[in-house]
Amino acid sequence: MQIHAIVELEERTLTLTVGTREGSQNKILKCQRLPLPDLGRDHVATALRTLGPDPLMGATGVHVILADRRMQHFVSTVPKLSAAEVVAFVVREALRVSGMSSTEAVLVAPELLRQLSGGRLVIGATTLAKNVWDPFHEAFRGAGLAVVGLHSMESCMAMAAPLTGERTAVLECSSGRARFVLCDGQSAVQVRRFLVGGSGEGDSSALVAQLAMELPRTLDWLRESGHPPPQVLVLGTRIEVDAESREMLRGDLERVVSATADFTVGPGAQQPGLATAMLLCRLCAGQDRPSLLSAPKLELPWPRSAFVALGAAATVAMVCAWSAVVDSRAVFGVQEQLVEVASERLRLEQELVVATSKIVPTPAIEPGLERLQGALSLRRPTSRLLAEVSNSAPSGVHLEALQFASTDKVVLTGVVHGPSRQKALAGLTDFAQRLRALPYLRAGGQEEVSEVAGQSNRFRFKLSLSWRNS
């Protein structure tokens, strides 16, 4: 019996879940939650040391699910290339998305989603700057826990999306925060996070009302980002709503369903969140999930020429067999030919398997290109940023803080108000569009908008953008 341990890290909670497969059923042996003041290394290390003398219950290592805003997800369509070239393309895109300048500074987990006509491939990927993970890794090593896998909260949530071909999104609430994940297959494409009242769990009219208000905004945000809205919304394990509330949330969607996770909860154990539940079911089934700690690799489908070669070998074998039946005088010679053809076919199959399954190492960046990328990443028009952000703000937008650094994101926080709720949101949308039009910035896709208590026409916002490196 193989035991799997998963630690889920989010802003206010550390959750340890241990599970296994008994017969044909996945079972949760332990689910322990500890409060976290924040995601600092010292607080995480302290929480890990309080888990007990044998926290993993015999598991050889722990899989970590990290809920961090600095996790990035993207989907790219690439032309017909070799596995090494596809991995190189994904790594370059990860460097662009994360704002890093070298391959050693970024973690990437690519995944093949599907193959299109003409040999084009659709690749989904999760990426994270290595310096974000290093403090957490030190905390686990200090607690004597070996980390065998690293995943993002959103990529694990995406595994709850049904493989029906419909455009799907997954919604989960935890620790006072809701996460909306637009999926392509079972890979995260776009992520929006927003605050919810209370703990964000349970069946409450306040939670349903807040979700009913935020979902239309989220769908509008998707349209503005160039993504068609989903047809199906999957609710996580921590959102329990009745049929009437589900209909209220449906709006322009075709269906709203609850996520299904195949597991039972043992005595004294709590129910884990959706991300942990989906990853545990995948591990218990013996299926791998791309980890950010592994070297990026892809297993591409066999090319058409390989099937042609195998078909030709099979045809030769059939012809030889028929000749053996027709011409009894050459039966022994035909049998020898059949053995040779079968041996050659086996050799070809083995070579194809090795060629398509070997790990492709991360391509190295040329020294000159690396220096150029490093120089570009340090050139920041800060004085122009201050002037144009100030000029872009309409009369109803009041900026409270502008945070930026050479290699970090640009974060703006403030308050917007207007004569009506609709005009206030329209003013904020106009401000955000002006910021996205600035040539040296690009949209980060991480906006937070929350209503000021008691004032329906006043909203507090937080906008995140990234520097362009070229």
Image (cartoon, grey):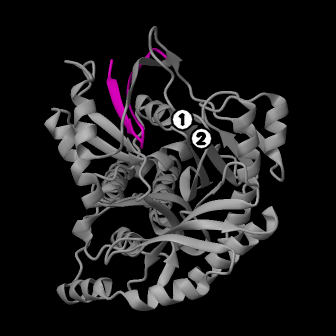
Judging from the image, what secondary structure is the residue with disc 1 in?
helix
Asked if residue 453 is positioned above or below residue 90 in the image, the reply reads: above
244 displayed left or right of 76: right
**Residue 385 belongs to magenta span:** no
- In percent of width and height, residue 395 lies at 68, 80
- Please name the residue shown 74% across and 38% down the image: 208
Query: Who is closer to the viewer here, 398 or 345?
Result: 398
- Please name the residue shown 26% across and 25% down the image: 59
Tell me whether circle 2 and circle 1 mark residues in contact (CB < 8 Å). yes
* Secondary structure, magenta segment, majority class: strand
53 displayed left or right of 270: left
Query: Who is closer to the viewer here, 8 or 417?
Result: 417
Asked whether the viewer can see residue 470, the reply is no
Asked if residue 406 is positioned above or below residue 12 in the image, the reply reads: below
Earlier residue among tags 2 and 1: 2
Return the residue at label 1. 274
Residue 172's tag is: 2
Asked if residue 23 is positioned above or below residue 190 in the image, the reply reads: above
Asked if residue 67 is positioned above or below residue 36 in the image, the reply reads: below
Amino acid residing under circle 2: Glu
259 displayed left or right of 47: right
- In percent of width and height, residue 191 lies at 56, 57
Judging from the image, what secondary structure is the residue with disc 2 in?
strand
Amino acid residing under circle 1: Leu
- In percent of width and height, residue 373 lies at 29, 85
Asked whether the viewer can see residue 430, the reply is yes
Q: Quadrant of residue 366?
A: bottom left
Q: Quadrant of the C terminus?
A: bottom left
Alpha carbon distance from label 2 to label 1? 7 Å
Query: Who is closer to the viewer here, 461 or 110?
Result: 461
Bounds of the magenta segment = 1-24
Instruction: Give neighbour class at mark 2: few <14, some 14-19, many 20+ (Cα, 10 Å).
Output: many
